[in-house]
Amino acid sequence: MKAFGKILGLVLLGLLLIIVALGFALTHLFDPNDYKEEIRQIARDKAHIELTLNGDIGWSLFPWLGLELHEASVATLTAPTQPFADLQMLGLSVRVLPLLRREVQMSDVRVEGLKLRLNRDKQGHGNWEDIGKNLPDETTDTPAPAPAPAPVEPVAETKPEKPPQPIRLDIDSLTINNARVEYTDEQTGKQLSAESIQLSAGAIHEGASIPLKLTAFLGSNQPLMRVKTELNGNLRIQRALKRYQFEDMRFSGEATGEPLQGKTVSFSTQGQLLVDLAANVAEWTNLKLSANQLRALGELKVNDLDKTPQVSGALSVAQFDLAKFLESIGHPLPAMAPGSLSKVELVSRLKGTPNSVALENLNLKLDESTFSGRVAVEDFAKQSLRVQLKADTFNADNYLPAKSEAAKGATAARQAEVQSSEAGAMAAGGNTPLPDAPTKGAWSTDKLLPLTRLRSLDIDADLAFGQLTLSQLPIQNAVLKASGIDGQLKLDTLSGGLYNGTFQANGTLDVRQDLPLLAVQTHIKQVPVEKILQAQGKNPPVKGQVTLDSNLTGRGNSQKALIDSLNGTASFVINNGVLLNANIEQQVCTGIALLNRKTLSTVPPGKDTPFQELRGNLTFRNGVASNPDLKVRIPGLTVNGNGDVDLRVLGMDYRVGIIVEGDKREVPDPACQVGANFQGIEVPLRCRGPLELGAKACRLDKDGLGQVALKAAGNRLNEKLEEKLDKVNPKLKDALKGLFNR
């Protein structure tokens, strides 16, 4: 028995030596390079590709079937001279015996210098679509004779074939060095590339964790971009379960290019990825995202992978400086109020499809404001934006672009002009000459609207604010509803409480043309007019509760252009008000004294003049408002006026008549006395200057006073004015004391 074992061992050893000898003989005596043409033909017939082997083929047989290809290229049969892929070297080895069990056991797989060229021609056809396709059969003009019908044979019952079992992969390692992928679209001229691709993977086994590292440089020409990327993680493949996991994934890199305006963005994402094709579900958990100063956490889940994918998840963005972030990615914002967009924080649920995304249950902290609600892009292609938000407080003025230096200079020049006019008007108790009409422009030429962006905007917004500050006006419980599409924007309503009164506005904006057209309707009810003016940084010339209705249109993309083209109508009423520093008494007494040919012994000081009502109607034409029916009801007086308000320079020019209704009480100054002939006459005033002066810009109209004297003289119109006054003076018996019933 022992001898038999020795004999059997010798036989096996002999067989092994024979196999080794045969392998050695085959690998050294058989050269596959002699069969390149046969290999090319097999590639044409079986794989339907054009294979070019410019380098040597190296191989080994046992126990590994080893293969090395050098300087090879692959093309389609339709374009055999235009390779879509070539490589410098491919090296791999496979165990022979497991192949018989449909198992692939490889050692190291190495790919050097792989280059893929993908091209879509002007007809939209991609060269990759012809891979594996055979050339069409040649057709002849004469039809082939129909084959004779074959005899009918009974069909034998066949058992259904079992689905082929997937080949089991078993690779010790995979390495790809210096690979490149190019994509060109001749229809659009767009080019994409992935260069210097380096891939290294550890042992690849079914269901096992596969360490993986991938680096590449990505580029595009539309826009011109360059991105350095690195991917790390552990890949787990379970093909039988159609389950794929990427554990501890980290994708990071740097991006630069035209959209970033020379800036560099450092980004990083990480988390756990799972794709379950059996359940048609994909998940990204423990998501962490960073991009320069931006930091975010979240999770994503995608359902219905086989249909229209449905995305859901959550997102949390830590507080960051949005202004600095945008500047770091090459998109700096215009200068705003200090600290604007410096504290931004967001928490939201996500819902979406491949064509839409929505932030549900949104909680957004923006500086000192807190928003809640929903923001959605319903159609990426159309940029359809839908906004439903509520906020506690929001100061919109903090987010408006700052004035340019030119606008600041123009504002300063006008302020200086107003201050000079006001100082002159108040000098000498208001007896100075009539102020000059203002000449300095009051409005900026800075562009107001991003027309290109507005033309493509598709928006529907519904906003509510506990307090909205707009143009320095604090609107309480504000509601804003707006919409826009195809360059036509509509303000359905902007309403709320304003200083215990109400404010409401609506309008339209058409930006389809180079000069946008603005139409706005405004309704203000019982709002203190002085507080509106004070909010604009102006000293109010009047106090009172204003009610205003206006319907105005303007065309242009700057304050100046809109004001210069302003047309429309407005009506206003101010109740229970006060003309501040309005020396109306002085002007009336000066006129009466002239009619009496007397000199005032005292100069009435400047003081406030209360009134019961101030009203009028305005008609706007190219920035100038005509007001033919100004009326002011003052105790003891009736004031009528007509004139213009030039909004281009915020100036006024009025002719005002003051009718003295009379008062029987004595006044200290005998020169200011009203007799029967003067009671009911209209003392003329001229008011000219900046609007900020109000009644301080009014002076006695001495030219018009002559007409008053002629009327008071009655039937003796042919006598000289001095003679009329001498005869009228003795009849003056009542003083003007209490002229304003104060």
Image (tube, rainbow, N blue to C red):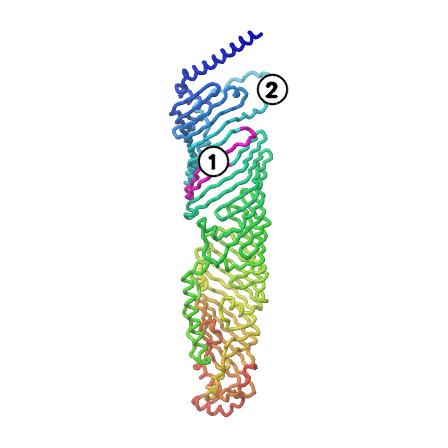
Image quadrant for the N terminus? Answer: top right
Secondary structure type for disc 2: loop
Q: Which residues are magenta?
A: 205-232
Disc 2 marks which amino acid? Thr
Secondary structure type for disc 1: strand
* Mark 1 lies on residue: 214
- Image spot of residue 283 (x, y percent): 57, 39
> How many labels were placed on the picture?
2
Q: Residues within 10 Å of mark 1 (few under 14, many from 20)?
A: some
Which one is earlier in the sequence, the residue at label 2 or at label 1?
2
Residue 413, compared with residue 88, is above or below; it is below
Q: Specify whether residue 539 is in view.
A: yes
- Side of 207 relative to 49 (left or right): right
- Image spot of residue 108 (x, y percent): 47, 27
- Image spot of residue 201 (x, y percent): 49, 31
**What secondary structure is the stretch in magenta mostly built from?**
strand
Q: Specify whether residue 84 is in view.
A: no
Q: Residues within 10 Å of mark 2 (few under 14, many from 20)?
A: few
Please tell me whether residue 432 belongs to the stretch shown in magenta. no
Residue 717, compared with residue 614, is above or below; it is below
Residue at figure coordinates x 44%, y 75% from the top left = 423
**C-alpha separation, residue under disc 2 versus residue under disc 1:** 49 Å
Residue at figure coordinates x 55%, y 38% from the top left = 273
Please tell me whether residue 206 belongs to the stretch shown in magenta. yes
Q: Which mark is residue 158?
A: 2
Of the pair 626 and 175, the residue shown nearer to us: 175
Disc 1 marks which amino acid? Leu
